[in-house]
């Protein structure tokens, strides 16, 4: 048996890991810990100049900043893996780059877990409509069963 847990450093993702451990430890199941970091272009939007030209981050790669973001993602995974080790659960880690909702669905297709366990920020319907919801997206698009934890 295998569980995939999406880790983003939020309290909701910590609750998701706790729930996954409550399932995995008695079943001696494997846990796949996933963190998705967004590319730099996700953090700094393009801007339209008065000339009609779009100016954005794409022309200004910053390898050092990209590495810091990847290191932060790896640190989240290491903390989650330490938690799994303390609970005597077998785990592996995956660090992906991309839009979280798409990357999670891609990894679910690749890993074929028995269940995806993901945290929810508890957005109201208006916030979810304006901001989008990763958990809502994966519930409707992933091929494995999904447990959303608050």
Image (spheres, grey):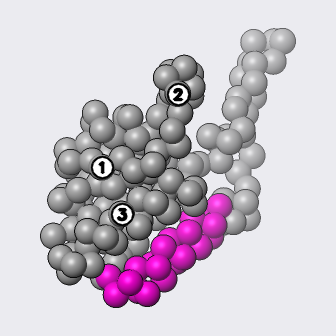
**40 or 85, which is in the foreground?**
85
What residue sits right under mark 3 in the picture? 19
Magenta range is: 69-89
Q: Which residue is mark 1?
A: 147
- Secondary structure mostly seen in the magenta stretch: helix
Q: Position of residue 80 (x, y in %)?
A: 48, 73
The reply to whether residue 34 is in sight is no
In the picture as drawn, the residue positioned furthest to the right comes out as 50
Q: Nearer the viewer, residue 93 or 29?
A: 29
Q: Which residue is mark 2?
A: 124
Give residue 67's mark: none
Apparent side of residue 4 relative to residue 94 in the rendered image (left or right): left
Mark earlier in primary sequence (2, 1): 2
SS label for mark 2: loop
Q: Is residue 9 above or below residue 50?
A: below
- Tell me what residue is drawn at x 81 percent, y 18 percent: 49
Please tell me whether mark 1 sits on a helix, a strand or a loop: strand
Element type where label 3 sits in the image: helix
Residue 142 horizontal/vertical position (percent):
26, 42
Residue 64 sits in quarter: bottom right
Q: Are marks 2 and 1 in contact (CB under 8 Å)?
A: no
132 drawn magenta? no
Residue name at image x 36 percent, y 47 percent: 148
Crowding at dot 3, Cα within 10 Å, few <14 / some 14-19 / many 20+, comes out as: some
Q: Is residue 74 above or below residue 110?
A: below
Q: Position of residue 60 (x, y in %)?
A: 75, 46
Give the distance between the C-alpha atoms of the residues marked 3 and 1, in whole angstroms.
9 Å
Residue 81 magenta-highlighted: yes
Q: Which residue corresponds to the image point at 38% horizontal and 34% vertical from the top-left?
A: 136
Can residue 41 be seen here? The reply is yes
Q: Position of residue 116 (x, y in %)?
A: 29, 54
Question: Would you say the residues marked 3 and 1 are in contact, meaning their CB atoms lie under 8 Å apart?
Answer: yes
């Amino acid at each position: 048996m295998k569980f995939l847990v999406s880790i983003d450093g939020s309290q909701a993702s910590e609750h998701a890991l706790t729930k996954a451990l409550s399932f995995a430890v008695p079943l001696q199941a494997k846990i796949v810990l996933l963190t998705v970091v967004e590319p730099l272009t996700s953090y700094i939007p393009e801007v339209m100049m008065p000339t009609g030209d779009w100016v954005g981050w794409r022309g200004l790669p910053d390898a050092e900043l990209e590495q810091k973001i990847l290191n932060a993602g790896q640190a989240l995974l290491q903390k989650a893996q330490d938690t799994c080790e303390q609970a005597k659960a077998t785990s592996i880690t995956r660090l992906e780059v991309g839009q979280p909702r798409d990357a999670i669905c891609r990894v679910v297709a690749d890993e074929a877990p028995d269940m995806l366990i993901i945290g929810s920020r508890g957005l109201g319907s208006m916030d979810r409509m304006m901001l989008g919801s990763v958990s809502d997206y994966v519930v409707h698009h992933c091929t494995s069963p999904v447990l959303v934890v608050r």
